[in-house]
Image (cartoon, rainbow, N blue to C red):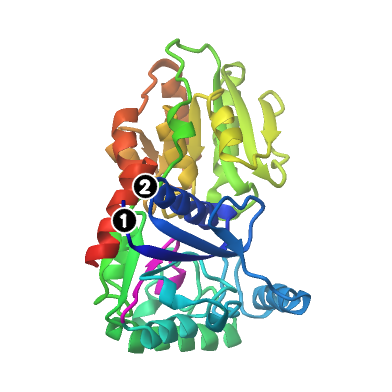
Amino acid sequence: MNSTRVLQLATSTGGGAGIAARRLHEALTEIHVDSTLLTLSGDNKPSGIFEVKRSVYNKIKSSMLTALQSIFLQATDQLLTPLSKNSIRERKINLSNYEVIHIHAYYNLLSSSRIIKLCRENPKKRIFITLHDERFLTGGCHYSQGCTNIENECRNCPQATRIGKYLVNRDYKKKVKTLNSLQNLSLISPSAWLQTAANNNPATADLKCHVVRNPIPQVFFDVPVSQEHEKILRVVFISAHLNTRMKGLTTLISAMNLLAEQGFSDRFELLFVGRGQVPNFLDSRIKFDKAVTNTDEETANILSKCQILAVPSIQDNLPSTMVEAICAGLSVVGTKTGGIQEILSSYDQSIVNVGNSKELAAELLYLLNVRSSPSRNKALSEFSYPEVAKRLVHIYETG
């Protein structure tokens, strides 16, 4: 159907960004685009996905770099990675085989300097970077949380130690000086929120930034939706790591505790999906379960047994779990942050203020009596593999 040959690069096929990269590869393949995905790791490797072979020494170096940045550069619990190791050697990849290079999350796969060099050395290649978080727009923080120090070239990064501030500022200054001059580089954003951030950023203001949603597999659209009103609502919370503070699990726990105090503990059940521990301050009267999923089919099966997804993130771009739930016909309650609110508003779903457990509890209680299922037909036209892939191919060809 299409002669464009695409090389996709992603650190892994796990986590939000890695899953999105893998699904995009599958979506392109489904409409017969020649797509190849190179990744450092990944348990499932369908056709066209290849692992970049690294020595044990290089794997240790990557792990040590992550640990050292956490210890010596990161001043808060927010992820900060201004340094990134180059793990791909172009001499081992025949770039002449591809017209398009699409880079996803690239930590310890490529450095910012290497991406800039890649663009300069291959001026006829069309190069795209998907913004899965704000890292490419900053000196290394994955979410700025509204920080305006970027206007001063990140010299006073509140997330960095003294030496971290120097490295963050150095990386960001390099981006400001070089990125806008790269004629063959464009950005992809899953959300309008991050597109706006890119357009307003001094380092990327002159680069084209297109909104392309992360594709969702058909299995989520095939989940049956219950037409009966349930006496007990199962609320599901999904995160790769349950204890990641940015995902806001403590807000959900506080909201459920409020409902228990009001005598509604027998009307709700909780399901936590992901690795990590459930906080021990959950009211003992609330029935809950915990699970870990490794495949899209397992996640879709879990959603088929739930009625509500809670997305109480402190800050987030556009979590795929939220979109999966919408495609599966679940009601969703999320927070006014990042790309979450733009999607939930579009699908008439509940939105609460960040960290406000009282508002979250009230919305959950409302859904006991008034279920608001999103339009699956609309979701199909926006997030299905063929629709997302066709939009992306158009961007590949037109820039």
The one nearer the camera, 254 or 26, is 26
- Residue 239 is at least partly visible in this image: yes
Q: Which residues are magenta?
A: 124-137
Q: Residue 62 in the image: state x and y as whole percent.
A: 68, 75
Q: Residue 115 in the image: state x and y as whole percent.
A: 45, 80
Is 360 above or below relative to 243?
A: above
User: Which residue has dot 2 on it?
Assistant: 31
Residue 133 counted in the magenta span: yes
- Residue 153 is at least partly visible in this image: no
Say what secondary structure mark 2 lies in: loop
Q: Amino acid at mark 2?
A: Ile
Say what secondary structure mark 1 lies in: loop
Q: Are marks 2 and 1 in contact (CB under 8 Å)?
A: yes
Q: Residue at x 53, y 76 (%)?
A: 93
Q: Residue at x 58, y 28 (%)?
A: 301
Whole-angstrom CA distance, mark 2 to mark 1, is: 8 Å
Specify the farthest residue to the left: 398
Mark number, residue 308: none
Q: Residue at x 30, y 57 (%)?
A: 393
Is 323 above or below relative to 192?
A: above
